[in-house]
Image (cartoon, helix red, strand yellow):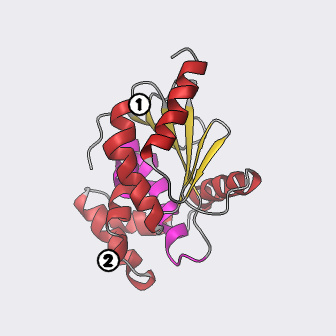
Amino acid sequence: MTTMTAITLDTQSRIVEGDASSAVRVLIFEDMQCPDCVAFREMLDEKLLPRFGARAAFEHRDFPLPKHTWARAAAVAARFFEARQPELGARFRQWTMQSMDDINAGEFEDFLREFAAQNECDAEAALAALQDRQFAGLVERDYQDGVARGVRRTPTVLVGDVPFVERFKVEQVATAIEAALREAGL
């Protein structure tokens, strides 16, 4: 689960992996309870970040689908961990996606407690954060941004104006990133 790229928060409190100052932005609308997002996360970790992380910014946006019972809570919890340390927030997102099959709505809080304990965070503070209006507002802002951009399914990955939705090949995204890098003179 370790990436070799920088993990930061941008000015809008969003996780950015790679070169946060890059003119090339890859927007990732994701749902932590989405199997296709899990597949994209693996693609990102294994292929895209090693290849482009030093030259492009991979900006995560929360888009919890209403049909998923604990996705919104997971997004809010991720914001709690990100506020403490961006790397911790990214680790929570990765761990949640990797553990998706082991979580159900009734056990999400137990899962959250376990992650907090394993990462030396106050579990009760993590649980209380699920009711935090600021964190919930950040998630909702991302969701509404996605709706305004026409996002309906996850993952939706935007490289400039080029969308990749649900299932796609790594080379399709890589080709779009390469073109964006060339256009930006990077």
Magenta segment: 67-92
Q: Residues within 10 Å of mark 2 (few under 14, many from 20)?
A: few
The x and y percentages for residue 124 are 38, 68
Q: Which residue is mark 2?
A: 102
Q: Amino acid at mark 2?
A: Asp
Of 176 and 42, the residue lying toward us: 176
- Residue found at x 33% / y 73%: 111
Residue at the right extreme, as displayed: 148
Left of 166 or right of it: where is 46? left
Residue at the top extreme, as displayed: 185
Of the numbered discs 1 and 2, the one sitting upstream in the chain is 1
Q: Which residue is mark 1?
A: 52
Q: Secondary structure at mark 1?
A: helix
The x and y percentages for residue 8 are 44, 36
State whether residue 166 appears in this view.
yes
C-alpha distance separating marks 1 and 2: 32 Å
Answer with the quarter of the image where residue 144 lies: bottom right
- Residue found at x 43% / y 45%: 170
- Is residue 150 shown above or below 129? above
State whether residue 85 appears in this view.
no
User: Which of the numbered marks, if any, corresponds to residue 33?
Assistant: none
Q: Is residue 70 magenta?
A: yes
Of 176 and 11, the residue lying toward us: 176
Q: Amino acid at mark 1?
A: Phe
Nearer the observer: mark 1 or 2; the answer is: 1
Q: Is residue 152 magenta?
A: no
